[in-house]
Image: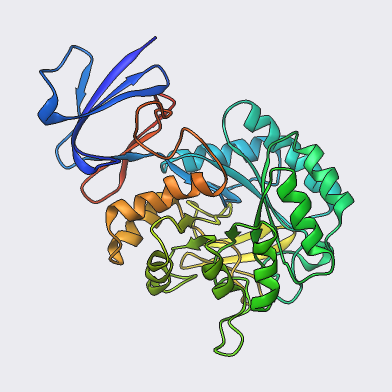
Amino acid sequence: MSHTTLVGERVLAAEGARPAQVRIDGDLIGSVTALDDVQGHGPDVEVLPPGSVVVPGFIDIHVHGGGGHDMAASPDSMRAAVDFHRAHGTTSGLVSLVTAPVEQLCRQLGWAADLAEAGLVAGAHLEGPFLSHVRCGAQNPAHLKLPDTDAFSRMYDAARGHLRMITIAPELPGALPLVEQAVAAGVVVAVGHTDATYTEAEAAYVRGATVATHLFNGMRPVHHREPGPVLASLDAGARCEVINDGIHVHPAVLREVLARGADRLVLVTDAIDATGVGDGSYELGGQQVTVSDGAARLDSGSLAGSTLTMDRAVRRAVKDGIPLEQAVAAAARNPAAAVGLDGVGAIAPGARADLVVLDAQLRVTRVMRGGQWIS
């Protein structure tokens, strides 16, 4: 078994950011020791540059592509998009699939299962097809379906046990029985792309939904007499995805979610293939997308995912006044808890050695996954 010891002046472990030594045994973290308690360094020690911050690997539970690669295009493209985001600090997470014909989603879920069984991702997230036409956003309306337990079963089987999360609009006929079916199968249910009233969304949470898909976006807006799914999600204690790219939500949204509990905020990218490539014309779920100044939109003006990476989401959160510890928790520990991932999302003994080294400006300088530095 290989052994590596990293020494950093700011290691973000359970006790907060402090000078510490992290011992890595094989693919796991063996120990985290405050430098004041370290009696000298052995020959396998690497001292990180001054100003470095060591944080747990980021976990993105909602991402569609990146680096010019659409996860839904082919197995190779799915893998390449995962690799692109890994270089930006995302060491684990889900493959998200937009609405498409069920047969096509089954094929894509098979690709995601292959990656999960190779240990490269934690599973798949179905963002559809059981979503609202009224709030479909960039989901292709031609392929939206009413909740269908048989269709769900087909997709669940195609994922070979690796379907981790599904987004459902709870106001649709048959949605609540489907929520119960998915929860019973061990799949996390998220409320999203929904025109639900407060009461309709609340009913989904009562039946076991636990996540809000990109809070505020693709949802009936808050009104003082009908607060809708946003307040229902906050009141239910849901983990709330937020796309923190400076386009999808105001910084006050992050503060409001955090005010409901430090474990509630889940940073996601919702990134598409244009991420890391630049402005231009792209396609998402069979629809034309134009990226201009980093904002991805359909011809209708609807936002169509983002061009965000997790490291940028964390930097922006800190810039917006969120303490570093809370921003990193929202990018690592909280998403891991949201979809039931154990042994990741923290710098702690026994956790997988997934680490990101940031410089003083919180830019990624190195990424370790499973005890191995990636190039």
In the figure, residue 365 lies in which quadrant? top left
Q: Quadrant of the N terminus?
A: top left
- Name the residue located 56 percent from the left edge and 62 percent from the top edge: 280
- Name the residue located 63 percent from the left edge and 78 percent from the top edge: 220
Furthest-bottom residue in this view: 225
Looking at the image, can residue 300 be seen?
no
- Name the residue located 36 percent from the left edge and 12 percent from the top edge: 2
- Describe residue 39's horizontal placement relative to residue 99 as left or right: left
Residue 208 lies, in percent from the top left, at: 67, 56
Residue in front for this viewpoint, 11 or 65:
11
**Considering only vertical position in the picture, is 155 above or below 166?**
above
Residue 193 lies, in percent from the top left, at: 67, 68
Looking at the image, can residue 287 be seen?
yes
Furthest-front residue in this view: 206
In the figure, residue 370 lies in which quadrant? top left
Furthest-top residue in this view: 1
Residue in front for this viewpoint, 45 or 259:
259
Q: Quadrant of the C terminus?
A: top left
User: What is the tally of numbered marks visible in this picture?
Assistant: 0
Furthest-right residue in this view: 150
**Considering only vertical position in the picture, is 140 above or below 165?**
below
Residue 296 lies, in percent from the top left, at: 56, 66
Q: What kind of colouring is applied to the model shown?
A: rainbow
Residue 275 lies, in percent from the top left, at: 51, 53
